[in-house]
């Protein structure tokens, strides 16, 4: 159950309609999270480290991140984050 981090082209972002997705923001903080559905998000600003039982990943501005359904993790927001997000 891995977190997937990609770089998308502007064409790919347009095709997926990401710029029309809602925006979520979060200040510097640490919190537990559980994904009851798959989330895809495009990081607009900030830096985050996410730790799960199986991995530690760091991502930031420009990264397209997919969190799998069923993932339990801890978010550590290093720099205030803004992201477009979509749940499947």
Image (spheres, rainbow, N blue to C red):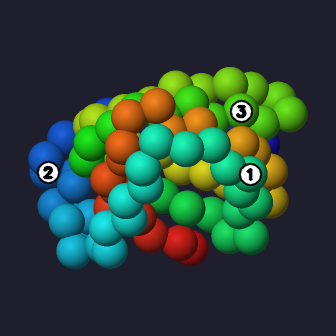
Q: Residue at x 56, y 30 (%)?
A: 49
Residue 3: x and y, percent? 63, 39
Mark 3 or mark 1: whose residue is earlier in sequence: 1
Circle 2 sits on which residue? 11
Question: Which residue is the site of mark 1?
Answer: 32
Q: Residue at x 74, y 70 (%)?
A: 36
- Please name the residue shown 74% across and 26% down the image: 55
Q: CA distance from mark 2 to mark 3?
A: 31 Å
**Residue 51 got which mark?**
3
Task: Say whether disc 2 or disc 1 marks the residue closer to the N-terminus.
Answer: 2
Asked if residue 87 lies left or right of residue 24, the reply is: right
In the structure shown, which secondary structural element does the residue marked by tag 2 occupy? Answer: helix
Q: Is residue 69 visible?
A: no
Quarter of the picture containing the N terminus is top right
Q: Label 3 crowding class (10 Å Cα cut-off): few <14, some 14-19, many 20+?
A: some
Q: Quadrant of the C terminus?
A: bottom right
| Position of residue 75 in the picture relative to residue 74 (left or right) | left
Instruction: Kindly report the distance in space between the C-alpha atoms of the residues bearing marks 3 and 1.
Output: 10 Å
Q: CA distance from mark 2 to mark 1?
A: 34 Å
Q: Give the crowd class for mark 2: few <14, some 14-19, many >=20 residues within 10 Å.
A: few
């Amino acid at each position: 159950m891995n977190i997937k981090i990609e770089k998308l082209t502007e064409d790919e972002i347009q095709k997926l309609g990401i710029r029309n997705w809602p925006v979520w923001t979060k200040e510097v903080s640490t919190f537990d999270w559980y994904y009851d559905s798959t989330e895809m998000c495009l990081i607009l600003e900030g830096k985050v480290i996410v730790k799960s039982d199986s991995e530690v990943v760091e991502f930031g501005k420009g990264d397209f991140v997919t969190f799998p359904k069923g993932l339990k993790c801890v978010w550590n927001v290093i720099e205030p984050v803004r992201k477009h997000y979509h749940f499947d």
